Image: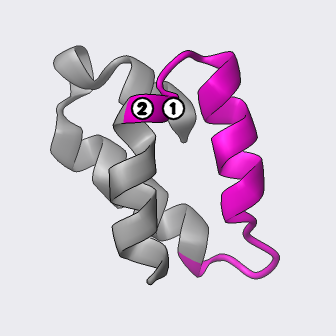
Amino acid sequence: MIDCFHWRNEVGIDVALEAARSYLKRRGASPAMLMDYAKLCKVEKLVTPYLETMVS
């Protein structure tokens, strides 16, 4: 899912957002785990506002 944000210019931000929504609907989804992966992929600053909006 975080790869979609990393490659957002190729796949489109709408695809990345849909992947995030789909993940968060899954049972056992962890926003904290997503942020850990975002840090690893160096897209934390990009993912944070979207994730905060989706979780709240």
Q: Find disc 2 in the rendering and name its residue.
A: 45
Which amino acid type is shown beneath numbered disc 2? Lys
Figure quadrant of residue 11: top left
**Image vertical order of residue 29 relative to residue 10, above or below:** below
Which amino acid type is shown beneath numbered disc 1? Glu
Contact? badges 2 and 1 (CB < 8 Å): yes
Q: x, y percentage for residue 44?
A: 51, 32
Q: What's the residue at 60%, 17% (across, down)? A: 41
Asked if residue 41 is among those painted magenta in the image, a careful observer would answer yes
Q: Give the range drawn in magenta.
A: 25-45
Q: x, y percentage for residue 34?
A: 66, 48
Q: Residues within 10 Å of mark 1 (few under 14, many from 20)?
A: some
State the predominant SS element of the stretch in magenta.
Answer: helix
**Along the line of sight, the residue nearer the viewer: 46 or 17:** 46
Q: What's the residue at 19%, 17% (across, down)? A: 9
Q: Find disc 1 in the rendering and name its residue.
A: 44
Asked if residue 1 is among those painted magenta in the image, a careful observer would answer no
